[in-house]
Image (cartoon, rainbow, N blue to C red):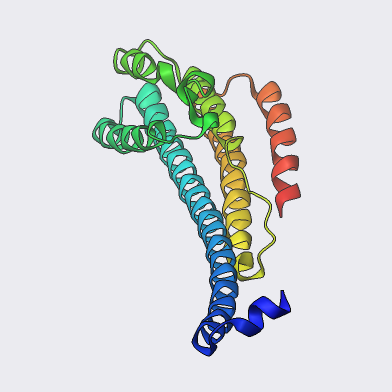
């Protein structure tokens, strides 16, 4: 091997000496490039989860508003125009989540009871749905939607701030859900003055859970 290398022209020897480091550099560059691609895919996944989490939070918020308007309409035949405008905003967010590709969002309207929202609205418009049923339907749907919030595990320090933001967003959303149920229960009691003891007993448990988030 040494004899073969010694017989090579100097130009060929220099060319080989130059090629070997280049091959090594190309190999290292490909490794770095692949690692960067993995990081980009990871970040894209986190951003997608954050966007979906924000959409869920907005949908929950809009359902809570629609619950309030629907309750007022079922109870006092008031705030009909606000209720109709709110339905449009709620529907737009439902449509956004329907476009999500993740498995947990497949047919999500079925297990969050939102597949029945059009028929429920029709019954509310016809005064066939009482205030208690309104609170029941929307609160059940909101409760189930909160379970779709998920915070992926995180190992990258440069994404720690975004990770903390996702956790905070989820916690505030869940606090809003419990607070909305408490408010709706008291609102119902003030107007109907029925099932007071049972409603207060159930509300006490919800209030205790709400306090744990503080």
Across and down, in percent, residue 24 comes to: 60, 73
For residue 1, side relative to residue 21 (left or right): right
For residue 209, side relative to residue 173 (left or right): right
79 to 106, vertically: above or below: below
Residue in the image at 52% along x and 54% along y: 41
125 to 55, vertically: above or below: above
Across and down, in percent, residue 186 comes to: 57, 34
Across and down, in percent, residue 96 comes to: 36, 37
Name the image quarter holding the N terminus.
bottom right
For residue 210, side relative to residue 94 (left or right): right
* Nearer the observer, 168 or 20: 20
Name the image quarter holding the C terminus.
bottom right
Q: Residue furthest left?
A: 81
Residue in the image at 61% along x and 82% along y: 7
Q: Quadrant of residue 177?
A: top right
170 to 130, vertically: above or below: below
Q: Quadrant of residue 194?
A: top right
Residue in the image at 60% along x and 37% along y: 182
* Nearer the observer, 48 or 173: 48
* Nearer the observer, 44 or 37: 37
Across and down, in percent, residue 62 comes to: 41, 40
């Amino acid at each position: 091997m040494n004899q073969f290398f010694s017989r090579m022209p100097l130009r060929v020897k220099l060319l080989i000496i130059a090629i070997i480091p280049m091959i090594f550099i190309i190999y290292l560059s490909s490794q770095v490039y692949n690692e960067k691609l993995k990081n980009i895919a990871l970040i894209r996944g986190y951003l997608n989860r954050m966007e979906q989490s924000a959409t869920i939070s907005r949908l929950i918020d809009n359902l809570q508003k629609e619950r309030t308007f629907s309750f007022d309409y079922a109870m006092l035949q008031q705030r009909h125009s606000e209720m109709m405008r709110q339905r449009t905003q709620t529907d737009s967010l439902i449509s956004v989540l329907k476009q999500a590709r993740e498995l947990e969002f497949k047919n999500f309207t079925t297990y969050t009871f939102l597949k029945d929202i059009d028929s429920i609205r029709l019954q509310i418009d016809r005064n066939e749905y009482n205030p208690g049923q309104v609170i029941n339907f929307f609160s059940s749907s909101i409760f189930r939607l909160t379970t779709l919030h998920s915070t992926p595990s995180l190992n990258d320090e440069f994404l720690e701030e975004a990770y903390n933001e996702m956790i905070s967003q989820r916690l505030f959303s869940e606090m809003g859900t419990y607070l909305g149920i408490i408010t709706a229960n008291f609102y119902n009691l003030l107007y109907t003055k029925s099932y007071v003891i049972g409603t207060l007993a159930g509300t006490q448990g919800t209030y205790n859970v709400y306090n744990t988030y503080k």
